[in-house]
Amino acid sequence: MTQAAGPVKLTFYCPLVGQLDDGECDEYIDVGSGFLTAYQDGIEQAIANEQAPEMGDMAQYLDRNAGVAAKLMSAVWTVEEIEGRLLGRIDCHLKEPLTTEEMADLREEIIGQCSDGLGEGFEQRPINTDEGDLYVSYWNSSDEYFLCTADELDEHLDQHQGMTM
């Protein structure tokens, strides 16, 4: 996918939740980050397919705040392994830095896309694995959910050392 790269890059991270339909149980099986990491390539390809060029750049859906809309050139969902955990990563390219208010609005809109927009559609599409169909979500309703910038991530992970994500 071709994306407009602005001079300012802002990256957000969130936990991923995975469920497996192994075809044998009546219910999906929750899988941990280690399982997701093993299928990183498949997850990356699936989220890239969800953002096919004919759908336009996700930045067009993050436009509630006029200041954000004027500065945001592209927004791309992907994944990244950090400290053995597979996390959702959202890369935003901007023309210039955001104000505090714009940053808060962009964060809210990204969470909305993770839960109800792009993320909702993505979590409903199976990713074929050797173990069965894998469903991956960029959002969950637990108290452990977060959306951190790259600058905030190290502190967040340090504070939540040992917690399952």
Image (spheres, helix red, strand yellow):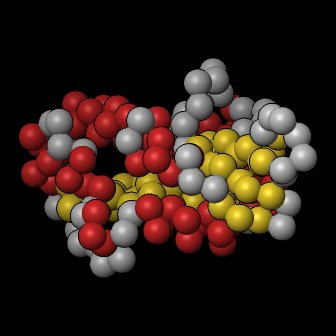
The answer to whether residue 153 is seen in the rendering is: no
**Residue situated in front as seen by the camera: 46 or 21:** 21
Give how far across and how far down residue 32 sits, in percent: 80, 45
Q: Quadrant of residue 8?
A: bottom left
* Location of residue 51 with respect to 25 vertically, above or below: below
Judged left or right of residue 127, residue 71 is: left
Judged left or right of residue 158, residue 48 is: left
Q: Quadrant of residue 95?
A: bottom left
The answer to whether residue 18 is seen in the rendering is: yes
Give how far across and how far down residue 33 sits, in percent: 76, 50
Give how far across and how far down residue 86 sits, in percent: 68, 55
* Location of residue 110 with respect to 94 vertically, above or below: above
Give how far across and how far down residue 160 sits, in percent: 72, 32
**Residue situated in front as seen by the camera: 133 or 119:** 133
Please tell me which residue is depicted at 66% across the width and 72% down the height of the picture: 41
Please tell me which residue is depicted at 9% across the width and 40% down the height of the picture: 66
Please tell me which residue is depicted at 51% across the width and 62% down the height of the picture: 47
